[in-house]
C-alpha cells in the first residue's frame, strides 16, 4: 500500500498552531514519526491560511524535506501555493494533491504536472460538481485519465481519488467508493487509487472502526493507496494483515517483519 501520511494539515486543531508559529521542531517531529511509521509520502497542507498559503506551504515543504527523504504530497486547491511548493521541492517526485476535471483547475494544474514532472491525485469531480453514482464517477475518472495520458502523464503517475463521502450522509456512499475503485482498477490496472480514508466515518460513532472496515473492503476492491494516519498502529496493522490476506505479501514476509518490529497491534 502507498501510504500518504495526513498529519501535517492545517485543518487539524493540534497542528494548526505549529504552522501558525512556524514551529520547525513540531512539524519535523510529525514528518519523522510518520516516515518511520511507514508513510510512503508526506502530505503537506496549509489551506487554512488563506492570506499567505503559498508562503506557509513553501515553509512546510522546506521544513519537512530537511529531515525526511520521503516524497511529498503537496495538498492545496490554490495553484499559486502548489507552484511555490514545487519550486522548493528537493525530495523525490512529488504528488500534486489534487486536480479535478473542473476546467479551471485542470487548466491551471496540468502545466505544473508537466513542468515539474510530478505524479498527481485526480478527484472524481467535474464542472457539474460531485457526482452521485458509481457510473458518473467512473466516467469522470476515464476522462481524467484520458486527458492526463494524452498530455504525456504516465498511468502509474496518476492516483484516482473516488471522493469518499460520509456514510452518515448517505448509506450508499461506502458502496459507491468501493465499486468506483473496483471499476477504475479493473479498467486501468496501472493507475493507482488514493482515498482520504477518514472521510467515510464523519458523523458516526467509533469512527476508527468504520475506517478499518472500509480500508479492508476498499483494498479487496483494488485500493492501493490511502491518505491516512500512519501513527495509528491499529489501522497500519490492518494494512499489513490485509496485504497478507490478499496475496500482496509473498510468504507474509512484510507481515512477519512488522510483527518482529513490534508494529502489529491486535
Ligand atoms: N482526498 C485528497 N486529499 C485530501 C483528502 C481527500 N486531503 C485532506 C483530507 N482529505 C485528508 N487529510 C486529513 C487529515 C487529517 C484528518 C482527516 C483527513 C483528521 N481529522 C480528524 C477529524 O476530522 O475528526 C481530526 C480533526 C482534528 O483533530 O482537528 O485527522 O479525501 N486527495
Image (cartoon, rainbow, N blue to C red):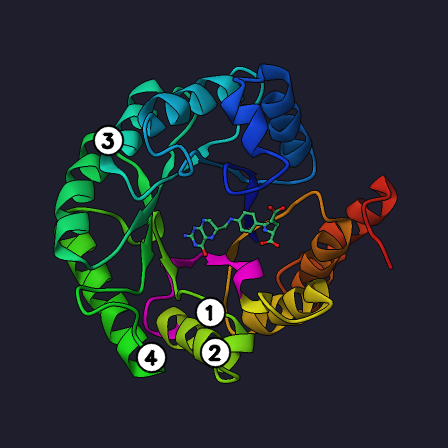
- Give the CA distance from mark 4 to mark 1: 10 Å
The answer to whether residue 196 is magenta is yes
Foreground pick, 170 / 143: 170
Question: Eyeballing the image, is 103 above or below 95?
Answer: below
The answer to whether residue 197 is magenta is yes
- Give the CA distance from mark 3 to mark 1: 27 Å
Looking at this view, name the residue that lies furthest to the front: 51
Residue at 29% from the left image edge and 74% from the top image edge: 131
Asked whether disc 2 touches disc 1, contact meaning CB atoms under 8 Å apart, the reply is yes
Mark before the other along the chain sequence, 3 or 1: 3
Which residue bears the numbered disc 1? 165
Asked whether disc 2 touches disc 4, contact meaning CB atoms under 8 Å apart, the reply is no
Q: Residue 11 placed where, x, y %?
A: 51, 42
Q: Residue 52 placed where, x, y %?
A: 33, 25
Secondary element under disc 4, as helix, strand or loop, is loop
Which residue bears the numbered disc 2? 173
Secondary element under disc 1, as helix, strand or loop, is loop
- Looking at the image, residue 240 sits to the left or right of residue 157; the answer is right
Which residue bears the numbered disc 3? 80
Residue at 18% from the left image edge and 62% from the top image edge: 146
Mark before the other along the chain sequence, 2 or 1: 1
Mark before the other along the chain sequence, 4 or 1: 4
- Segment colored magenta: 186-199
Question: Which numbered circle lies on residue 132?
Answer: 4
Circle 3 residues within 10 Å: few <14, some 14–19, many ≥20 = some
Label 3, ligand 1: CB separation under 8 Å: no
- Give the CA distance from mark 2 to mark 1: 6 Å
- Give the CA distance from mark 2 to mark 4: 9 Å
Amino acid at each position: 500500500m502507498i501510504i500518504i501520511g495526513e498529519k501535517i494539515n492545517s485543518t487539524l486543531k493540534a497542528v494548526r498552531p505549529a504552522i501558525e508559529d512556524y514551529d520547525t521542531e513540531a512539524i519535523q517531529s510529525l514528518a519523522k514519526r510518520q516516515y518511520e511509521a511507514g508513510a510512503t509520502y508526506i502530505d503537506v497542507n496549509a489551506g487554512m491560511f488563506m492570506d499567505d498559503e503559498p508562503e506557509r506551504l513553501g515553509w512546510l515543504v522546506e521544513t519537512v524535506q530537511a529531515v525526511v527523504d520521503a516524497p511529498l504530497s503537496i495538498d492545496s486547491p490554490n495553484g499559486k501555493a502548489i507552484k511555490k511548493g514545487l519550486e522548493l521541492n528537493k525530495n523525490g517526485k512529488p504528488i500534486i494533491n489534487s486536480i479535478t476535471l473542473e476546467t479551471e483547475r485542470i487548466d491551471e494544474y496540468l502545466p505544473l504536472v508537466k513542468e515539474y514532472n510530478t505524479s498527481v491525485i485526480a478527484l472524481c469531480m467535474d464542472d457539474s460538481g460531485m457526482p452521485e453514482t458509481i457510473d458518473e464517477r467512473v466516467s469522470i475518472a476515464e476522462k481524467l485519465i484520458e486527458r492526463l495520458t494524452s498530455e504525456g502523464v504516465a498511468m502509474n503517475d496518476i492516483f484516482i481519488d473516488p471522493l469518499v463521502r460520509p456514510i452518515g450522509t448517505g448509506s450508499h456512499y461506502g458502496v459507491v467508493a468501493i465499486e468506483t475503485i473496483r471499476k477504475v482498477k479493473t479498467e486501468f490496472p496501472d493507475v493507482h487509487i488514493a482515498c482520504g480514508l477518514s472521510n467515510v466515518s464523519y458523523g458516526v460513532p467509533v469512527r476508527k472502526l468504520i475506517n478499518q472496515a472500509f480500508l479492508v473492503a476498499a483494498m479487496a476492491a483494488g485500493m492501493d493507496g490511502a491518505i491516512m494516519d500512519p501513527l495509528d498502529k491499529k489501522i497500519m496493522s490492518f494494512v499489513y494483515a490485509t496485504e497478507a490476506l490478499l496475496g500482496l505479501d509473498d510468504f507474509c514476509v512484510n507481515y512477519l517483519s512488522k510483527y518482529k518490529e513490534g508494529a502489529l497491534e491486535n
